[in-house]
Amino acid sequence: MKIKFYPRKPNKKVVTAIYASICYNNNRIIAFPGESVHTDDWNNKNGKNEPKSSAKNAPLIGNLFKAEKLYREIYEDLQIKLGGTVPPEIFKKAIADKKKPQQVKVDKPVPIGIADFFNKTIADTKSGKRLSDTGLRLKPDSIKPYNSTLASYKAFEKEMRKVYDMNSLNQKLLDDYDKYLTQEKKLALNTKSKYLKTFMLMLRYGVEKKVLDKKLLADIKLCLRGERSDSIYLNDSEIDDLLKIKTFKSPTHELVRDYALIGFKTGLRFSDFSRIKPEHINNGMIQITQKKVMERVTVPIHPIVADIFKKYPKGLPKCISNQHFNEYLKEICEPVPSLQKVFEKKITRENEVVIEKFKKWQLVQSHTCRRSFATNEYRRGTPVITIMAITGHKSEKTFLNYIKMDGAEHAELMQQGWNKIENNK
């Protein structure tokens, strides 16, 4: 007699029932010992077909041994009673009539997959079931990092050829994910840290929903540090070069240039300058509630911005999406001679600081406008507190990250201050 045990669904990443194949005297019957296993815990390589040897599987291995012993005892008893030959249907019924070898079994809840719970976190955030730490609903822009982080995690599982559940979460799994982002995807330090921070927010929600042990999360150690980003800004001369452009590939290119100029001269975020309407304009000022922080700001209308408003007397046409805006803006900036300068960007990849070289136009995007406004006003000597009142920054530390002058420009600014003192003597 040969008795072999198999999972019912060996090719799926699921918890599945185990059945026994019992072969004897050219007969074969199927029996069910009442056990189940996750296919990740089953070994079917190199001709083997058995539970993997581990402390977790010890009870299962013991119960399958008892089941095999019982099947053999039933067969031997039937041989004695029937005088040798045991028909398959009688053998199968005798097994069914016997008590199962294991104790009364309590069904365990099927663990939820990490990616599945990540999807739930995103869905609950969108619906308002999950709120921010301040008890407010998260804005759509705040949810975007969750989608990109989930995509990176699914790619990690595909690379590992394994689907993890919340119960399998441990330090090694997170270290492997960190290593994948760093070494396989070669992400910059800030991008990797953003993914890991978002991942940790999802895990915190797991603790809140009681699908993850609080102590486990407390014991996890992750390096979430970032680095100050080397970003460009456009000075007044470079902005004037954009203003001088008279021919465009398409009307959309011209509209994007005009919106960019508004951004350069107002310091507003894309989410705000892209939706300015006539009702936001009053007495030479733009008054608008910032979409990101829901704070109202008042911005003086620069002459360049005033000319753009006159250009569209019925109001600015609808702006394209931020992603497409950045693509069009690079196309506009590419032929501008002053934006051909090489910009060296210091960045950490694969745990090493490297210098990557770009032409300035390659790095221009919508947020360059806000950064340029802050830096140019600072260079003009506008008080920091005044610039912050226009940009809506609450923290001077955060605001100063927007000042992108290099060492030579700071030295020049100091020299100008000295010359002014000398001239006033």
Image (cartoon, helix red, strand yellow):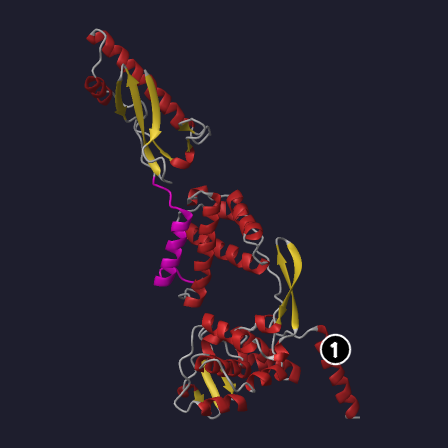
Give the answer, above or below, for where 106 lies relative to 286: above
Task: Classify residue 159 as left or right of residue 233.
Answer: left
Would residue 202 be visible to someone looking at this image? yes
The quadrant where residue 69 appears: top left
Residue located 20% across and 20% down the image: 93
Q: Is residue 320 left or right of residue 262?
A: left
- Residue 253 left/right relative to 34: right
Residue 113 forms part of the magenta stretch:
yes
Range drawn in magenta: 109-132
Q: Nearer the viewer, residue 349 or 168?
A: 349
| Quarter location, residue 335 | bottom right
In the rendered structure, the answer to whether residue 408 lies left or right of residue 92 reads right
Q: Quadrant of the C terminus?
A: bottom right
Question: Which quadrant does the N terminus fall into?
Answer: top left
Give the vertical position of 340 relative to 42 (above or below).
below
Residue 391 placement (x, y as % from top left): 54, 79
The correct choice, above or below, for 346 with respect to 154 in the image is below
The residue tagged 1 is 411
Query: What x and y, as percent, mark residue 111?
Result: 38, 42
User: Image height check: is 62 above or below 162?
Assistant: above
Q: In this rendering, does residue 302 appear at all?
A: no
Write down the quadrant of residue 82 in the picture.
top left
x and y, in percent, of residue 345 in the image: 64, 66
Which residue is located at x 42 percent, y 80 percent?
Answer: 275
Residue 417 image point, x, y percent:
74, 84
Q: How many marks?
A: 1
Q: Secondary structure at mark 1?
A: helix
- Circle 1: is it few (<14), some (14-19), or many (20+) Cα within 10 Å? few
Residue in front for this viewpoint, 202 or 18: 18
Name the residue type under label 1.
Ala
